Image (spheres, rainbow, N blue to C red):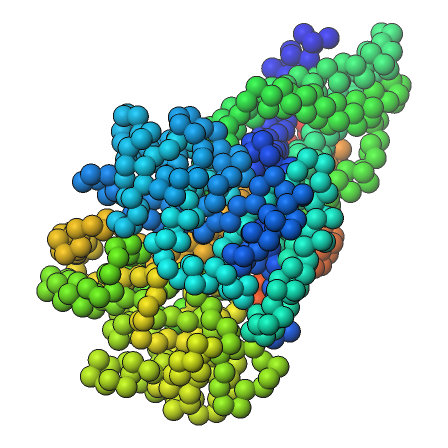
Amino acid sequence: MLKIALRRFVRDRTHSLIHLTGLAIGMAIAMLIGLWVRDELNYERENPNYERVARVMQNQTTNGDVSSNASMPLPLANELRTVYGANFDRVVAAWWVQDYALASGDLKLTKKGRFMEPGAAEVMGLRMVKGDAGLEDPHSILLSASAARAIFGDADPVGKTMTIDVKMVVRVKGVYADIPYHSQFKDVLFIAPLELFASANPWVKEMGTDWAYDFVEIFVKLKDGVDVEKVSASIRNISMGKLKTNPLGLAYHPQEFLHPMSKWHLYSSFRNGVIVGGNIQYVWLFGTIGFFVLLLACINFMNLATARSERRAREVGVRKVMGSLRSQLILQFYCESALVAFAAFVLATGLVATALPFFNDLADKRMAIGWSDLITGLGVALFTGILAGSYPALYLSSFAPVRVLKGKTGHGAVAPRRVLVVLQFTVSVLLVIGTIVVYRQIEFAKDRPVGYEPGGLLSMSIHTPGFADRAGTVRAELLRTGVVEETAISSSSTSVIWDIWTGYSWRGRNPAVQGDFSSIGISPEYGKTLGWKFVEGRDFSRDLATDSSSAVINEAAVALTGFKQPIGEQIKRADGRVFTVIGVVRDIVVGSPYERVQQAIYCYFHDYDRVYLFIRLKPGVATGSALAAVRQTFQRVVPTEPFDYHFTDEEHAKKFAAEVRIGRIAALFAAFALFISGLGIFGMASFMAEQRRKEIGVRRVLGGSVVHIWGLLSREFVILVGLSFAIGGPLGYFAMNRWLEGYVYHAGIPWWVFAATGVGVLGITLATVSWQSVRAALQNPVDALRSE
């Protein structure tokens, strides 16, 4: 039986190759999606405390909107330990992941890390390679294996001293294995005690006892058997009870809850204080796509098998006349489909192995194929072979020998095949519409005015203490290079909002409106360096002493305050400082390009902990030579600081990375779905040409033209594709409209998206059908009418 199947596979090479190609591509896509889905579902699972770790979060109400965030007051950590300690093994407060300057001897590097309380290793599930994980010593540090190699080479780093941001001296306590890529802690290359951070930043101690200031993350490790939902409900109103004497914090009605580690990656999107999804939506999306792509490949297998029924019919008739049972024929056809499925699996595995590096780059993954994947894939392949071979086996084996030996096979349940083709193209239409809408949304956000000129602008996070006092000297030296147009310092980058001050007030403020502003300290050259756009008023000037108490606000701030004539108005901060508005600038997109811009107030740089240096390169100067000159000057003037810079336009582009990845993956799958659907149309066209061979011969003898024959065979497929579009179009609109609603700033879905999809799919269909139609029409009618 296997020998007969192999012989037929080799003899009908063209037909077998089409079978094999469609099924192999479907399997390969399904395998890639399977690897992607598994990676998504395995986020954080290598942490041995995966089921018991949670992040403390809170819902806050601001001007009627409920937002969920992980920024918490520091006193909450101690409250959880002392009052609610029966529920927790560990409570760990942590400062945020940031870039820090690490130095050992003459070596200076910038690495991402965070400051955390003891117990960090348990929460993060660190696997220690050397030393121990204790952070009780305020001058200790834990390094990742890669960071240890970068700083100390092959030498044992345990016990060696180094500095963090120049001012913090630490000794290496231990080295941990690099955190897996599918973890939200993957960027943490070192961990130092939070106590050390507090001692180097006095403001931490000042704010660290006030429940109104949210500035740390808090992680907890639950005790065995503790129900996370019950604990979450019990801590709901901790802050509300502590803020009774602080109306500023009470106004936000904070309510705490626990967000389990198992939901960090897949369920990370909140709306009005409720989880509304996250990456789980993409898991379902691509999982569904993988299923349907594999289903399309199976449909093709069925259609292509039944399309050759005219040639197989006589074989079936002869076998039955010679005494073959139907069960034997069914087993024969199953054997053939299993052989094709196995060959397709081998080919698909090769395709996946070849494409995986490219797909990893595309999806930002580090996936690999293991033996378990191959065994699972082989099982799926055999199941696919049985599934795909069922209809042809049952259909072909049902032929009556008397009828088929007379050349009568009937139309073989054409309706089911038509339904399958409609299903194929409905899926293809949905994928094409989705891909176009995703790309339109990305381009829409990219075209959004950012409020400044990002091209040619460098940004540096500065770690050297007292740099703000030396910024004037640094500016003068950089301008002297001849390649720098202007420089400025700021308390915030152009990609992340760090400081949001609450409790601002102004003349005529509605008591129901909460005065939250992004507060950004800047040097007077900031506007010229960034190239911000003024709506009215003027920029800061070093020649005017009064500008030290002046402010520039953005359009969102004008909308919040309701100022009709903002120039000259005063805004008072909660600490008593009063700013006079001297200018209004266009909104600068600092956070997500898909969300509304936060109201912002820009004032003179004053007592800010963070310092960012911006350098505007002169246009027309070669970037390479300009960077070399800036690097040399900067390292001479600030020898303690590593020259680690970012181009702001590249930083802004990273904000679209997730959507770009989804769009590219969807486009790839849509292209293959169309290809597989095209093979399905090829199978149907082949079947129709086979069935109507004599009719075509008669029409040709009676004078029918090639165009007439082409139209005759194409008409049905145009109807089927039209029906697919009628189903897929509304479904695509509904699904993508729901997706777009997740963004505050989003594009619409214009009519041409559907027109382009319909025309494109129809064009592919006609191009596929035309090959078979014209081929059938050009055949010698004598061959079609000859009686054997």
Instruction: Note whether 246 is above or below 484 in the view shown.
Output: below
Instruction: Note whether 579 is above or below 427 in the view shown.
Output: below
* Quadrant housing residue 485: bottom left
Quarter in which the N terminus is drawn: top right
Q: Nearer the viewer, residue 341 or 227?
A: 227
Q: Nearer the viewer, residue 65 or 767?
A: 65
Tell me residue 233's x, y (percent): 72, 53
Tell me residue 43's x, y (percent): 57, 38
Q: Nearer the viewer, residue 187 or 586?
A: 187
In the displayed structure, does residue 679 sit left or right of residue 308? left
In the displayed structure, does residue 702 sit left or right of residue 741? right
In the displayed structure, does residue 416 sit left or right of residue 502? right
Task: Name the residue located 56 percent from the left edge and 51 percent from the top edge.
Answer: 78
Tell me residue 210's x, y (percent): 51, 64
Task: Name the residue located 59 percent from the left edge and 72 percent from the top edge.
Answer: 245
Q: Please say whether residue 262 is visible from this viewpoint.
A: no
Q: Nearer the viewer, residue 426 or 370?
A: 370
Quarter in which the C terminus is drawn: top right
Q: Please say whether residue 420 is visible from this viewpoint.
A: yes
Q: What count of labels does the image hold?
A: 0
Task: Name the residue located 46 percent from the left edge and 45 percent from the top edge.
Answer: 116
Task: Name the residue located 64 percent from the left edge and 45 percent from the top edge.
Answer: 85
Tell me residue 374's x, y (percent): 59, 21
Instruction: Note whether 159 is above or below 700 in the view shown.
Output: above
Residue sitting farthest toward the front:
82
